[in-house]
Structures are given as C-alpha cells and as structure tokens.
Image (cartoon, rainbow, N blue to C red):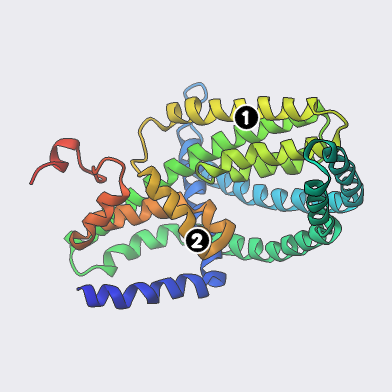
Amino acid sequence: MWFLATATVPILLGLLYFGRDFLIPIALALLLFTLDVALIRRLESITIGGWAPPRWVSYLLGNCVMIVGMVVLALVISGQLEAMKEAGPRFAARLEYLLAQVTTLIGDRQAANLIGSIEDIDLGAWISGLIDAVSGLFGVVSLVLAYLVFMLAERGAFAEKLPRLCTSPEEAARLSAILRSISESVQQYMWINTLTSVMSGALAYVVLKLVGVEFAVFLALFVFLVNFIPNIGSILAVILPTLVAVVQFDTLMPAVIVAVVNGGGNAIIGNVVQPAMQGKSLNLSTIMVMISLSFWSAMWGGVGAFMAVPLTMVTMIVCAEVPALRSVAILLSSDGVLPGETPATATEP
C-alpha cells in the first residue's frame, strides 16, 4: 500500500504540472459548467405570479448568460489593457515624482536604492507583456467555451451512461451519490462566491468612479476575480485599486477613501453577507485551504489559486468515500465530520 502510494504520488504530481496546458481548460470548463447548472436551477425556482419558466427557457437563458458573460469579460479586459498601455509613461513619470518626495522621509541612500529598483521596471514593456499574455488567454477562453458547450450538450447523455459504467446497481447508486455530493458542494460554493464577488466588484466600481480613479472597469473586474481566491484575494482587492489611486492623484485622500470604503465593504461582504448566504460551512480546514492554495498555485499558477477551494472540496468528498483515504478527508475537514455524517456518527468507533 505504502509502496503503491509512494510510486503513484510523484506520477500524479508530474501529470498535474507537465499536463497543465491540457488540464487547465478542462478544469475551468468543469467549474463553469457547475456554475451554469447552479444558475439554471435558480432560474427554474423563480416564480412570477404563480408562473414558473419552462425548463428549456431556464436552460437557454442560463447558457446564454454564461457564454455571453465570458465573451464580454474578455473584450472588456482587452480594451482596458490597451488604455493601460497608453497611460504607462504617464504613470511612470508620476511614480518617479512620488519617489522623489519619499527621499525626504527615508533618506538619500535608501531612496536611491528604491529609485534604482523602480527605474529598472519598464512599465510599458510590462503592460505590453501583459497584453500578449491576455491575447494568449483568449485562445484558452475559446477552448474553455468549446469544452463548456460540449459538456452542456452531453449533460443528459452522461446521466444515461453512468449506470453502464458500473458493474452493479449498488455501485452505480454509490457513484451517483458521490458525483451528486461533489456537484452540490461545488455549485453552492461557486454560486455564493459569484454573487458576493459581483457585490465586491460593483462596490469597487462605484467607489472608483466616484473618486475618479482611472481604469475603474478593469480594477472592478480584478476585484471580482481575486475574491474567488480564499483569504489573500480580499487583500489584493484592496491593495491594487489603492496603489493606482496613490499614483494617479496629487493627494492621498482619494487613496484613503478607496482603501477605507473598499476594504470596509469587502469586510462586511466577506464576514457578514457571505456567511449568511452560505447557510452552512464548507467544513474545510483553514490551514488546509491555505496549503491547498499554495499547492495549486505552484501547479497551475493563478488559475490554480482560483480553483483551490473547489478542488479541495472534491478531494475531501472523494477521499471520504474511499476507506483507505478517510484519514485524508478528516484532515481536510475543519471538525472531522465528513459529508453525509453527523457529529454523533462521526465520533462512533
């Protein structure tokens, strides 16, 4: 057993790392697929004056919202990056001016070292590289959309194939229960985090627009996306808009407003609104989530950080169903209670 695990783990790690260009689009498509299913289910539950939309209407509307939303997101980011490229020299000049002002506060020697480090950064080249990276990302988005479309088309067929994949009805029922548990957990996470991330992004956009910060749309989208990253995302959502405000304006008051309002709003959304919407905890250990965040970031970069929590939930649910791996599931959980258990049954010998 231990020899098999020792031989298998390095192989799996190698497949995850060296096969990331193949696996990342599939993983993203699966994640968007679960979000799409969650959206369709919410649309099906809507009633207006006793009338509920037919299933095909909910299905069509949910799919259109998902696909159109991804295309619009890619186009908006592309346009904003072009504007950032044009503003690069102006922001670089402003940054040099700010560093000159800092000289009187930290001393000539420290300021010289800091200025020398900053001058080595070519903002124009950095933004151009970012644009090239986003251009390559568009190819990934197209592939993800293609996978997503085929997953939606084969959704019903897969349910019919499932019993044929198993050797007995009992095995089919067990596999179906595992997949249903994974689907419900990931749907709950994605749906609630999407709503709360939209709230954070909308708040950031309103604040940045009122203050007059440039690239408000791009920064709001940045806030929306990084809020999916546990713990660290909420910090990044405050730091970047604040730094842009510091560089753009002659006084610190706009940056203070952005930091206080944006940070306070994110704190309320993350600590009050999200737990109230969640209803029940995801039951994941905080330290294990941070370890998972580091692991998947090392494996798949920013996409891995974005998917760390869903992948950890899937791992815990699967390990809970395999007797030899139940200890791993217990380690990943926050209180040792596995999916489908109650505190009483979890403590039984």
Q: In percent of the image, x 82 and y 60: which residue is there?
A: 120
Point out the frontmost of discs 2 and 1: 1
Residue at the spot 72% in from the left edge and 38% down from the top edge: 241
When asked about the image quadrant of residue 344, the answer is top left
Picture coordinates of residue 221 (x, y %)?
68, 43
Left or right: 231 in relation to 322: right
In the picture of the structure, the residue carrying the numbered disc 1 is 263
Res 236 visible: yes
Q: Residue at x 30, y 57 (%)?
A: 318
Tally the marks. Answer: 2
From the image, tell me which residue sits under label 2. 27
Residue 304 lies, in percent from the top left, at 52, 58
Q: Quadrant of residue 243?
A: top right
Amino acid type indicated by mark 1: Gly
Looking at numbered disc 2 in the image, what kind of residue is underneath it?
Answer: Ala
Picture coordinates of residue 336, whole percent (x, y):
24, 44
In this view, the residue farthest toward the top is 49
> Which label number is shown at residue 114?
none
Provide the secondary structure element on which disc 1 rests.
Answer: helix
Q: Nearer the viewer, residue 188 or 203?
A: 203
Decide: marks 2, 1 in contact (CB < 8 A)?
A: no
Quarter occupied by the N terminus: bottom left
Q: Is residue 150 visible?
A: no
